[in-house]
Image (cartoon, rainbow, N blue to C red):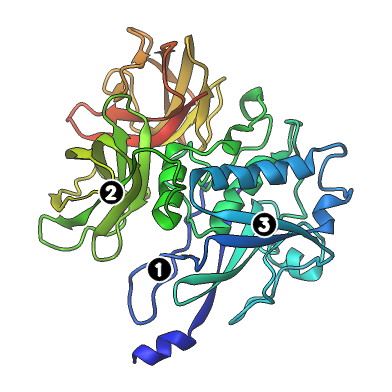
């Protein structure tokens, strides 16, 4: 009955993993299989920062710029959308217990309290942080961020620690209602590398990717000063047998640059929406989510978007199995499931890991005119029996726009697979 919906309150927990991917949890609307679209009722959100974070503690490196990290992570989201986040200090140490409602305080904490520790009890070293979100009728009523008290954080790139600002930027995205992104180089990606991966500090998650910005603008709109925003591409994907194409990753790339602009997953009924798009022309692509049934990448066409316009895109897709799979990307003879960062005006050696990768049978390419695979640079690499690996050199043009770019691999039979936003150009 309709009245029952006003009585339903729920809670979900989302997290960023330390090394490996973790699928985000999409809560369903009462009585349906449709994922909820969560956001705060108003555009002013209050966050309390626990003294466990602001005062010296063993989990945050001494002399870290804690207040700066908090402020910059908040400012990143405020600059992207029409929201105002107010920060205050609190002596409260623990998140609200799971249940039908919280205590009304949205808290950031790292205290080693029983409640906080229990949140990570199953796999204490697997995640850098978790956010518990309380909501009612699709409106967020409270969200608590818990930095994992089993992990170490810093703001200066110290080896083996997690970057505090990148972690907070990701978790505040959850607090605002965003789920994990399928774009590897997005702040909302479900994987965050520790500092020292590839021998480098990993602070790239501090800056929002275009797909992060599009997602938050789709929820909250933009400030009046924002130009040429926002449009959307929405529609429904079905299979050749007219069944909903569920669990399919859909993304848009700028046609002129190849940068990933937005990404979403289809709902159980096959519907999708790529919102928060700036005016421009986009190529739209799809790929079955996950490795269980890897599918070939498909194109949905090129669409021009104008401010305030929603373009409809209903298509049938063929979920054919791809003969190659891409799972990892890396540099310096290492692989990870996070994006790798490249500098412009340089040549880089890139490693790809997956299944059935063979330099003689696979072609690697990009949709960007700014990134070029160097001729005769493809080589097979030996990483053991569990994964096939190839390497190749890419030249990044000096004028490459900052952003994230996808890698496409095409097998001998013409089937194609992709790592969405696997390269991040600073």
Q: Earlier in the sequence, mark 3 or mark 1?
A: 1
Q: Are the residues tagged 2 and 3 within 8 Å (C-beta)? A: no
Q: Are the residues tagged 1 and 2 within 8 Å (C-beta)? A: no
Kindly state the secondary structure of the residue where label 2 is placed.
loop
Label 2, on which residue? Answer: 308
In the image, is residue 237 above or below residue 329?
Answer: below
Q: Tell me how far mark 2 sits from mark 3, CA to CA.
A: 29 Å
In the image, is residue 134 above or below residue 322?
Answer: below
Residue 299 falls in image quadrant: top left
Give me the residue at 72% from left, 54% from top. Answer: 148
Label 3, on which residue? Answer: 86
Neighbour tally class for label 3: few under 14, some 14-19, many 20 plus, Cα within 10 Å: few
Residue 211 appearing in the image:
yes
Residue 279: x and y in percent read: 29, 37
Give me the residue at 31% from left, 43% from top. Answer: 251
122 sits left or right of 269 in the view: right
Label 1, on which residue? Answer: 36
Give me the residue at 38% from left, 38% from top. Answer: 227
Kindly state the secondary structure of the residue where label 3 is placed.
strand
In the image, is residue 330 above or below residue 146?
Answer: above
158 sits left or right of 285 in the view: right
């Amino acid at each position: 009955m309709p009245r029952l919906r006003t009585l339903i309150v729920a809670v979900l927990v989302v997290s960023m993993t330390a090394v490996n991917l973790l699928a985000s949890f999409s809560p369903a609307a009462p009585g349906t299989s449709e994922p909820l679209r969560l956001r705060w009722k108003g555009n002013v959100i209050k966050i309390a920062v626990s003294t466990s974070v602001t005062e010296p503690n063993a989990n945050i490196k001494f002399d870290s710029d804690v207040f700066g990290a908090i402020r910059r992570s908040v400012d990143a989201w405020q600059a992207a959308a029409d929201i105002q986040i107010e920060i205050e200090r609190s002596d409260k140490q623990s998140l609200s217990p799971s249940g039908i409602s919280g205590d009304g305080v949205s808290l950031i904490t790292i205290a080693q309290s029983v409640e906080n520790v229990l949140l990570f009890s199953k796999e204490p070293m697997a995640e850098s942080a978790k956010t518990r979100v309380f909501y009612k009728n699709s409106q967020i009523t409270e969200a608590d961020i818990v930095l994992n008290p089993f992990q170490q954080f810093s703001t200066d790139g110290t080896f083996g620690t997690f970057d505090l600002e990148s972690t907070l930027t990701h978790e505040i995205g959850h607090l605002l209602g965003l789920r994990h992104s399928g774009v590897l180089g997005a702040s909302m990606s479900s994987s965050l590398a520790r500092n020292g991966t590839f021998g480098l500090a990993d602070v790239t998650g501090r800056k929002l990717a275009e797909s992060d910005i599009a997602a938050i603008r789709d929820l909250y709109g933009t400030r009046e000063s924002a130009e040429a925003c926002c449009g959307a591409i929405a529609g429904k994907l079905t299979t050749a047998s007219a069944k909903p194409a569920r669990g399919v990753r859909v993304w848009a790339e700028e046609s002129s640059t190849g940068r990933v602009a937005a990404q979403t997953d289809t709902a159980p009924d096959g519907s999708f929406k790529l919102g928060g798009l700036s005016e421009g022309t986009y190529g739209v692509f799809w790929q079955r989510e996950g490795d269980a049934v890897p599918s070939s990448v498909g194109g949905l066409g090129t669409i021009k978007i104008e401010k305030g316009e929603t373009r409809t895109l209903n298509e049938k897709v063929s979920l054919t199995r791809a003969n190659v799979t891409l799972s990892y990307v890396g540099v310096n003879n290492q692989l990870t499931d996070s994006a790798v960062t490249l500098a412009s005006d340089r040549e880089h050696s890139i490693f790809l890991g997956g299944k059935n990768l063979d330099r003689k049978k696979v072609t690697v390419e990009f949709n960007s005119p700014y990134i070029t695979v160097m001729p005769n640079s493809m080589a097979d690499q030996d990483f053991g029996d569990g994964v096939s690996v190839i390497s190749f050199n890419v030249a990044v043009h000096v004028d490459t726009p900052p952003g994230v770019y996808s890698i496409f691999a095409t097998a001998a039979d013409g089937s194609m697979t992709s790592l969405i936003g696997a390269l991040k150009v600073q």
